[in-house]
Image (tube, rainbow, N blue to C red):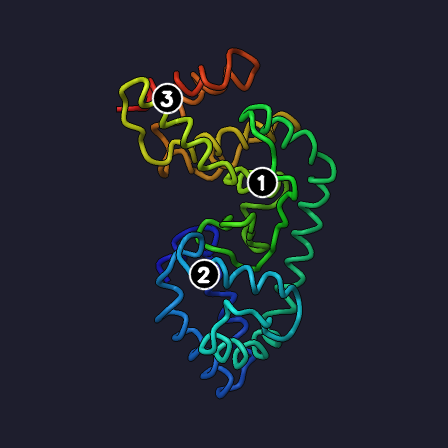
């Protein structure tokens, strides 16, 4: 329950309770057994990084809206048994409202991708000097994703919450491309480390993520000038990236505006934030 302190999942307990009210006492016991199974095992892992969760999420995502648990080797026997016992109750109590939310959020974001799906990634790829994944990113919508409202993991798997109010409208558009930018984490970190070595500096944690927040926000602002980027609107700079905001404004934004080169901008950034 600690995650419910985060806005992206603050409403999840109320949603859970609304569904539970539709179940019988026996069904609620089965559902709580499934929650206990998850709490004792998979919930102890990071959905983005720790095996086997990324493979499990992909297998479930590939199953789409099918009522049955997908046949996938990554879903082992205990997990399959738990899912098969709980799934009918989920589909009865929660799925109708969750599916409606998924459809609404898909239509909302898809309209913006259709309108700006060339300009936004065009800006981002020019800034990074890297090519977007040839096969693109398929966005999987789930009522609840994680404490942040969205995440991406290995193999171009992107999951976004359809009930998180913070990813509606243009914020959903920014989130889609923000998560897509994580495909370049290794490449950008290599560039940053190289600049840090040249400058004799130590690279601080999360600086590449700060660059993503800043660049994705600016990319969307270029197509809707009154836009307030996600990190600014949702307090992300103050929450953990404050040390990067002013240096990014002073070194990276001039490059995004057409001044200098990418590597010169990264070198200037590292000169400011490295230790």
Q: Position of residue 62 (x, y in %)?
A: 62, 61
**Looking at the image, is mark 2 or mark 1 nearer the viewer?**
2
**Looking at the image, is mark 3 or mark 1 nearer the viewer?**
3
Element marked by disc 1: helix
User: In the rendered view, would you say 131 is above or below 58?
Assistant: above
Q: Residue at x 63, y 49 (%)?
A: 138
Q: Which residue is identified by label 2? A: 53
Figure quadrant of the N terminus? bottom left
- Dot 3 or dot 1: first in sequence order is 1
Element marked by disc 2: helix
Q: Quadrant of residue 209?
A: top left
Q: In which quarter of the image is residue 194?
A: top left
* Badge 2 vs badge 1, beta-carbon distance below 8 Å: no
View extreme (top): residue: 259
Q: Which residue is drawn at 40% across and 66% down?
A: 42
Cα separation, mark 2 vs mark 1, equals: 26 Å
Q: Which mark is residue 255?
A: none
Q: Which residue is identified by label 1? A: 171
């Amino acid at each position: 329950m600690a995650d419910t302190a985060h806005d992206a999942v603050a409403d999840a307990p109320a949603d859970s309770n609304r569904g539970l009210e539709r179940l019988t006492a026996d069904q609620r016991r089965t559902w709580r057994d499934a929650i206990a199974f998850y709490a004792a095992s998979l919930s102890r892992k990071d959905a983005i990084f720790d095996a086997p969760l990324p493979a499990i999420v992909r297998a479930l995502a590939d199953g789409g809206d099918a009522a049955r648990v997908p046949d996938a080797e990554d879903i082992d026997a205990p997990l399959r048994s738990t899912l098969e016992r709980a799934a009918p109750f989920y589909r009865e109590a929660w799925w109708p409202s969750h599916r409606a939310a998924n459809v609404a959020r898909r239509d909302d974001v898809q309209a913006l991708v259709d309108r700006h799906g060339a300009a936004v990634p065009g800006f981002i790829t020019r800034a990074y000097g890297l090519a977007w994944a040839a096969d693109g990113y398929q966005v999987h919508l789930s009522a609840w994703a994680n404490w942040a409202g969205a995440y991406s993991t290995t193999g171009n798997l992107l999951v976004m919450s359809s009930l998180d109010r913070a990813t509606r409208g243009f914020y959903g558009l920014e989130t889609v491309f923000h998560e897509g930018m994580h495909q370049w984490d290794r490449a950008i970190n290599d560039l940053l480390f190289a600049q840090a070595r040249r400058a004799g500096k130590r690279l601080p944690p999360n600086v590449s993520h700060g660059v993503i927040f800043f660049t994705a926000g600016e990319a969307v602002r270029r197509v809707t000038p009154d836009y307030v980027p996600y990190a600014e609107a949702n307090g992300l700079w103050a929450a953990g990236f404050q040390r990067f905001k002013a240096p990014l404004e002073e070194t990276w934004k001039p490059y995004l505006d057409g001044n200098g080169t990418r590597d010169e901008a990264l070198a200037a950034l590292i000169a400011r934030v490295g230790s």
